[in-house]
Amino acid sequence: MNLVTKFTGYAILPVAAQAVLVTAASAASFTYGETAVQEIYYLSNNLAGRSIGTEKEQETVSYLSQRLGDFGFTPELQEFTFNYQDESYTSANIIAERQGISNKQIIVGAHYDTAPSSATLDRTNLEGTNDNASGVGVLLELAQRLAPETKHSVKFILFGAEEVGLVGAEHYVSTMSEKEIDNTLLMINLDSLIVGDYLYLNAGPRAAEKPSYGRFRDKALDIAADLGIEARTNPGLNPAYPAGTGCCSDLEEFDKVVPVLAGEATNWEIGALDGYTQTANPLVPGGATWHDPETDNLEFINAVFPGLIEERSRNYTQIFDTFISQVSSESVSVPEPAGIIGTAIAVGIGGLLAKRKSNA
């Protein structure tokens, strides 16, 4: 197959393909995580191998664009061209916005692509259930649940080409004007939310030097505590990854210009203490499922971690839905943290942790 591809718009999927999925009209009647789980299953079962330059990538763009349309948005494609391993590719970010009455905005992002095949590993059938159907599923449910009117605008972005160097996120940030940057309260990044011993909420790397950038992390941790959900943030056991911060996903590009709040599942207290080792479960080879067709799939995850897809989808959706509802409807001001980690420690949220994710 010719790996040089071009998006020329997206096709409308047959109605039958979505018959079992929840639509915006029924949003008030379903439980947290329901839509997220359905989307995770759909992407895993029908759109495996959605890496750059593939037909599955284009099908994914079409599908996700239509789903956002189902939820009352008018999605736009932001195309970008780049080189990867001496080949030229064109991918696209999918952008859907609900305008608020102020000039401020919240960005919510998740990448939809899976890692491409390499010389030693065929990833044609990589489901990417954890990385990153999970983030996409939660984003779609958050879009579905978003109130019809908010004080601040909320912009949902599904990024292409994350797995080959955060290319989609880098492109979007490069197009942000100074005005848009100034008016962006924060970027929420949703990546790899299922497989991991713990649920994490982190700020971006710059929060280590600019504590005010950690205020949204602290707010999210407080929300989780109020909801009775155990959430952690990076304890900083590895000096390369300061306490309370995350890394290695699209959040890094946004962290250069705006505050970041990132959700991820992993275990920052094992392995190299960098979040790359996700779990101490001996049934997971090497403690991680990153980019592995044999383990990052529905069958394996459900066998080794029964019920975890539903649990993490429910918890992350509830945390971020509550967070977005509060931040998008209230004044811009958010209390400054007491220190690097802020108020979450004071309420005893179950420890300090976070995650890391490889991009290639």
Image (tube, grey):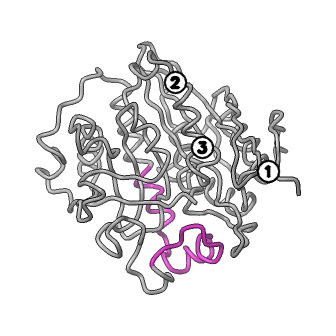
Q: Nearer the viewer, mark 2 or mark 1?
A: 2
Instruction: Determine which quarter of the picture holds residue 278.
Output: bottom left
Q: CA distance from mark 2 to mark 1?
A: 35 Å
SS of the residue under disc 2? loop
In the foreground, 26 or 121: 121
Quadrant the C terminus occupies = bottom right
Q: CA distance from mark 3 to mark 2?
A: 15 Å
SS of the residue under disc 3? helix
Instruction: Determine which quarter of the picture holds residue 96.
Output: top right
Q: CA distance from mark 1 to mark 3?
A: 30 Å
Q: Are marks 3 and 2 in contact (CB under 8 Å)?
A: no
Q: Amino acid at mark 3?
A: Val
**Circle 1 residue:** 17
In the foreground, 181 or 119: 119
Question: Where does the image place residue 28, in percent across and percent down from the top left?
Answer: 51, 38
**Circle 2 residue:** 176
**Circle 3 residue:** 167
Image point 37% across, 65% down: which residue? 275
Res 28 label: none
Q: Residues within 10 Å of mark 1 (few under 14, many from 20)?
A: few
Question: Where does the image place residue 257, in percent across and percent down from the top left?
Answer: 40, 31
Image point 55% across, 73% down: which residue? 301
Q: Amino acid at mark 1?
A: Ala
Q: Which residues are magenta?
A: 287-316
Q: Amino acid at mark 2?
A: Met
